[in-house]
Amino acid sequence: MWIEREISSELTELARRHPVLVLTASRQVGKTSLLERLFTGHRYVTLDLASNAEMAESRPAEFLRLHPPPLLVDEVQYAPGFLRDIKTTVDARRGENGLFVLTGSQNFLLMERVADSLAGRAAVIPFLGLSAREWAASRQPPSADDWMDFLWRGAFPALWAAGKDSPGRDRWYQGYVATYLERDVRSLANVGNLRDFERLLRAAAARCAQTLNMSELARDVGVSPSTARQWIGVLEASNQVLLLEPYHRSLGKRLAKSPKLYFTDTGLASFLMGFQSADALRGSPLAGALWENYVIVQWLRWRDWTQPAAALWYWRNQSGDEVDLLIEHNARLYPVECKLAERPGGHATRGIQRLRQLYGDSVARAFIACTTETPFDIAPGITAVNGWQTWALDD
């Protein structure tokens, strides 16, 4: 069963207006399947195949004779030098758009090369797994239990596309982690002990939605803080985790504080935490952390797909008052607190009230992202909304 992706029309429009379109994403989120479906007139070649990567890197002219544009190139990070030849081809065919559609699953390395070689020529879109709307459109309609199953199972399309015949969740993630460790980690960093790296993966999942203390993480895994920092960088580079920075008016202060750690897929995080069923997750005190993670990723997708000028932060003062998510959009701040409850109480607004005292009129309408079916005002200017999907920031 094909699950329609909300960004499809935007991708075809971007390819119409740019010579190069680049999708960056973790593996298995459906980027290649979507692009093959959208760009049927493009030839397809994957650089996951070592012989293709070697030819693209060392014999680009021969590669392009065999695979002329319009061309869809999968996992282009395996031949980073090839981006220079894409630039040469684009410049030689000035005025032609949609020449190359590229994908990559190692964001930092790919984006560094794209910035060097394809500045002004490429539209770059970060890509994620299924959105709540995409998933819900395939249900008739989803029940409350279905939503918790989505939080536990995650947003990888392969886990949903075949309906009841979809692969078993635990076995699928077991294979995903093993393949990820072998394919991406070894190419991104000199990881001497994959067992230690997998321990760091699980330790990171246990810290989901928490402020990242690198020294504490390193101590628990049994590696040095510099190694832990490098490996977290690997997770971020391969689009497995998101580091949400703290908000301050001063940019210097923004960089001085520790980020919060989230996984780009709650299913992977819940697997690494050891939850073997949605019911086990539902009854766990960690469910709230995964709910917060889920809401943050929904807004990350909103930012990357529709509002790239917006910024996402979290806020915390020295007294420990906190707002889980601060959306900076059109010079206004929209606070969002995440509560896995149907009717959150007034205590959920404390961080938002403290934020308003500090930043005054720059703080716009605020929200409590919860599981209520119907929005309601929980305090003046603070609305409880259903957090399963993004909502309108302004009336």
Image (cartoon, rainbow, N blue to C red):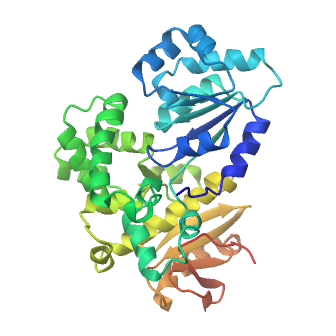
Q: x, y (%) of residue 134? A: 58, 63
At a point 59% along the width and 14% down the height, the residue shown is 66
Q: Quadrant of residue 232?
A: top left
Query: Residue 203, position in %: x, y?
Result: 25, 55
Q: Classify 377 as above or below 296.
A: below
Q: Quadrant of the C terminus?
A: bottom right
Front-most of 2 and 387?
A: 2
Question: In the image, what residue occupies the spot 58% across and 50% down?
Answer: 251
Q: Nearer the viewer, residue 360 or 123?
A: 123
Q: Residue at x 51, y 60 (%)?
A: 297
19 left or right of 251? Answer: right
Residue 92 shown left or right of residue 382 in the figure: right
Q: Is residue 33 left or right of residue 256?
A: right
**Residue 99 visible in image:** yes
Q: Where is residue 330 shown, x and y percent of the image?
A: 74, 61
Residue 258, placed above or below residue 86: below
Which residue occupies 31% across, 58% down? 205
